[in-house]
């Protein structure tokens, strides 16, 4: 079936297709001049580049996120234009048929390998599929992959399973000899997957990544710097009482917001086709795109962001005078060493940030009178 016929079968005309390409170009962080090139690459993908999508220790949330994307969306473009050879959640086959099909496709090589979920490393018996350790399946599939993409916090950094006993690791900790592109998030955002797949199709190379192997196009900016509540942060207007309507737009730092340490485009490119995102929905950022996400507890070696709704003391900043160490510890929690940390130090030093008595668990928070200008 040619490309045009496949579009028609999906109820898309060429105009709608080009509209989706324009959205995808923006998602890639590329100027509009690249739209014809991307459209051409997607059309040429009529040969359907093969994709193997493995699921380890996961909740299938990232699959759900991608499949529930907008219309016409990444799901239709990715799943219809790519040949998804193996995906436990959406394929009809199961058992030995599915596993031998996977082995055959791995032998052919050259596919895009997508991994969702973490990999247990404490003991292979924590996760076996078809009698084989998941770790071994990932290593074999990675060895013959054209490109490797880890989707979601678990596949990138261990995620929530890393707080448990399985020695959960991300793909980059298991596959050492090939480049891995990390698309974290809990779940991953569909536009990140679409943009990265398009980049693979168009440029045939790994996009520019940050130190955590995340594409700079999506993870190059600090959420705090683009937050719609940033003005209230600057005014030291911090939400302390969820039930006080006068505080509804206040900064969520005291409620555990990890935005000052989280790199993501969530504030610029909202979720669900621009409908909303966490902070605009009055939920503190949990830092789900960071390696520190949900990391805490005796089994976890990482200094972390957990608990979600509590400010965490994960770093110290030098040179803060005139403020007690206890207060400083609370003030700097959640702050970036560079950028937001400077503002927080300023707020702490001038006494604008409220003190411990607002923080004690079990006591109702009292809003500060007259803080709204
Ligand atoms: S601390 Fe969180 S809510 Fe407050 S301005 Fe920064 S990102 Fe926004
Ligand atoms: S705002 Fe924070 S918690 Fe919400 S999706 Fe973005 S990075 Fe994750």
Image (cartoon, rainbow, N blue to C red):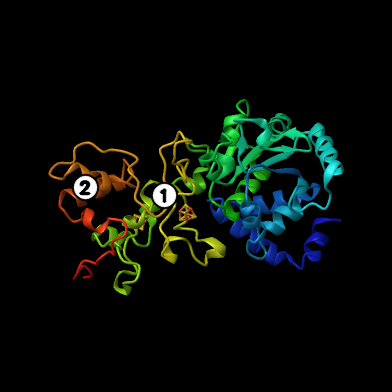
Q: Is residue 366 above or below residue 77?
A: below
Regarding residue 183, the answer to whether it shows in the image is no
Q: Is residue 137 above or below residue 266?
A: above
| Residue 243 located left or right of residue 367 | right
Q: Nearer the viewer, residue 139 or 308?
A: 308
The outermost residue toward the bottom is 245
Residue 222 drawn at (x, y percent): 40, 48
Secondary-structure class at tag 2: helix
Q: Which residue is mark 1?
A: 307
Count of labels in the image = 2
Measured Cα–Cα span from mark 2 to mark 1? 19 Å
Look at the numbered discs 2 and 1 and tell me whether their residues touch, using CB distance below 8 Å: no
Q: Quadrant of residue 113?
A: top right
Secondary-structure class at tag 1: loop
The outermost residue toward the front is 362
- Quadrant showing the N terminus: bottom right
Mark 2 neighbour class, 10 Å CA radius: few under 14, some 14 to 19, many 20 or more: some
Residue 51 drawn at (x, y percent): 74, 44
The outermost residue toward the left is 322
Q: Is the distance from the Cβ of mark 1 to the nearest ligand 2 atom less than 8 Å?
A: no
Q: Is the distance from the Cβ of mark 2 to the nearest ligand 1 atom less than 8 Å?
A: no
Measuring 84% from the left and 49% from the top, which residue is drawn there? 93
Q: Which mark is residue 65?
A: none
Q: Quadrant of residue 372?
A: bottom left
Q: Nearer the viewer, residue 271 or 47?
A: 271
Regarding residue 362, the answer to whether it shows in the image is yes
Among numbered discs 2 and 1, the one appearing first in the sequence: 1
| Residue 313 located left or right of residue 13 | left
Q: Nearer the viewer, residue 145 or 61?
A: 61
Residue 76 drawn at (x, y percent): 71, 59
Measuring 84% from the left and 36% from the top, which residue is drawn there? 104
Q: Which residue is mark 2?
A: 327
């Amino acid at each position: 079936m040619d490309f045009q016929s496949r579009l028609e079968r999906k109820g898309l005309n060429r105009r709608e297709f080009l509209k989706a390409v324009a959205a995808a170009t923006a998602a890639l962080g590329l100027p509009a001049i690249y739209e014809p090139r991307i459209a051409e690459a997607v059309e040429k993908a009529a040969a359907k580049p093969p994709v193997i999508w493995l699921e380890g220790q996961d909740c299938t949330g990232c699959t759900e996120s991608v499949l529930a994307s907008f219309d016409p969306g990444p799901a239709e473009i990715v799943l219809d234009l790519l040949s998804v050879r193996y995906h436990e959640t959406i394929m009809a086959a199961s058992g030995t048929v599915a596993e031998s099909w996977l082995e055959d496709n791995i032998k052919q090589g050259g596919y895009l390998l997508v991994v969702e979920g973490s990999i247990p490393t404490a003991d292979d018996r924590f996760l076996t599929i078809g009698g084989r350790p998941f770790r071994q399946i990932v290593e074999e599939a990675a060895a013959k992959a054209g490109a490797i993409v880890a989707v979601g916090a678990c596949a990138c950094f261990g995620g929530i399973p890393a707080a448990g006993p399985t020695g959960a690791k991300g793909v980059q900790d298991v596959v050492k000899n090939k480049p891995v592109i990390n698309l974290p998030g809990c779940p991953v955002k569909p536009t990140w997957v679409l943009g990265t797949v398009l980049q693979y199709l168009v440029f045939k190379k790994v996009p520019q990544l940050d130190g955590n192997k995340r594409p700079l196009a999506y993870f190059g900016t600090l959420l705090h710097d683009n937050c719609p509540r940033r003005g209230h942060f600057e005014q030291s207007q911090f939400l302390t009482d969820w039930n006080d309507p006068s505080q509804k737009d206040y900064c969520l730092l005291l409620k555990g917001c990890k935005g000052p340490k989280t790199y993501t485009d969530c504030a610029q490119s909202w979720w669900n086709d621009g409908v909303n995102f966490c902070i605009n929905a009055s939920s503190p950022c949990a830092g789900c795109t960071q390696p520190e996400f949900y990391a805490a507890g005796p089994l976890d070696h990482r200094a972390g962001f957990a608990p979600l709704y509590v400010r965490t003391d994960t770093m110290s900043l030098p040179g803060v005078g005139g403020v007690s160490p206890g207060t400083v510890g609370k003030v700097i929690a959640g702050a970036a060493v560079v950028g937001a940390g400077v503002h927080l130090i300023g707020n702490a030093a001038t006494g604008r940030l409220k003190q411990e008595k607002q923080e004690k668990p079990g006591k109702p928070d009292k809003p500060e009178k007259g803080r709204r200008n």
